[in-house]
Image (spheres, rainbow, N blue to C red):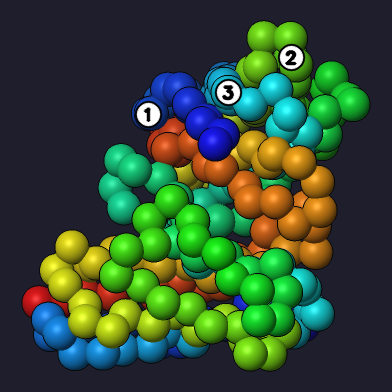
Amino acid sequence: GENVEQHPSTLSVQEGDSAVIKCTYSDSASNYFPWYKQELGKRPQLIIDIRSNVGEKKDQRIAVTLNKTAKHFSLHITETQPEDSAVYFCAARQGGGYSTLTFGKGTMLLVSP
Amino acid sequence: EAQVTQNPRYLITVTGKKLTVTCSQNMNHEYMSWYRQDPGLGLRQIYYSMNVEVTDKGDVPEGYKVSRKEKRNFPLILESPSPNQTSLYFCASSSGYGYTFGSGTRLTVV
């Protein structure tokens, strides 16, 4: 099955800095890569996703890049703010339709004012 | 409002006492899934369902049961809970891409 590795496990930055979280996946057939943000005590929420036919996607301060050859994808957050502090999960999905998402173990991002 | 509703939010129970965590979605999604979240281990899938009467094991199914008699409901059943099932549980549904998660159920088994 699919295996997703996520790094780093914790990340501390100063407000205004950029933050990058990296994930690798094992199955070259995976074709969908979402990112979830989980604030303390809350449910994970989808913040951005990318499909395998796209190399980069951007939404305001958040961007995701995908390198299919190397089987890795990254989340980039620019101009970080304290409200960006949360746990971020990457995920990968094999196949199409209703195939299961396999999640990374998460990155705790702390943005200090 | 489109949502996934889980109940209860918090539950403390004793070893061996059967319990059910309910999950309901109002988005007509065919795919539903249960995950448990433990510190340092991320989200691990317990069971999933691609449609009514179709369920399959995830990565950590031992000690759990599910059923999918209706499209909207996907209850998680612990027939004989043990302390190692103390965890935060999330139900999720999907129309094919991203998941919508429920609010979570924090279960403590003593």
Residue A17 higher or lower than A32, as above or below = above
**In the image, what residue occupies the spot 81% across and 53% down?**
A97
Chain containing the residue with disc 1 = A
Is A41 situated left or right of A49 in this image?
left
Between residue A3 and residue B36, name the one nearer to us. Answer: A3
Label 2, label 3: how many angstroms apart (C-alpha)?
13 Å
Dot 3, crowdedness within 10 Å: few (<14), some or many (≥20)?
A: some
Question: The residue under label 3 is which amino acid type?
Answer: Ser
**Does any portion of residue A72 appear in the rendered image?**
yes
Q: Secondary structure at mark 2?
A: strand
**In the image, what residue occupies the spot 79% across and 78% down?**
B27
Dot 1, crowdedness within 10 Å: few (<14), some or many (≥20)?
A: few
Disc 1 or disc 3, which is closer to the eye?
3
Point out the tag, 2 or 1, that comes first from the N-terminus: 1
Report the disc number at residue A76.
Answer: none
Percent x, y of residue B12: 21, 83
Point out the tag, 2 or 3, that comes first from the N-terminus: 3
Residue B108 higher or lower than A74, as above or below = below
Q: Which residue is mark 1?
A: A10
Percent x, y of residue B63: 29, 70
Percent x, y of residue B80: 21, 82
Label 1, label 3: how many angstroms apart (C-alpha)?
22 Å
**In the image, what residue occupies the spot 38% across and 88% down?**
B20
Q: Which residue is mark 3?
A: A26
Disc 2 or disc 1, which is closer to the eye?
2
Q: Which residue is mark 2?
A: A67
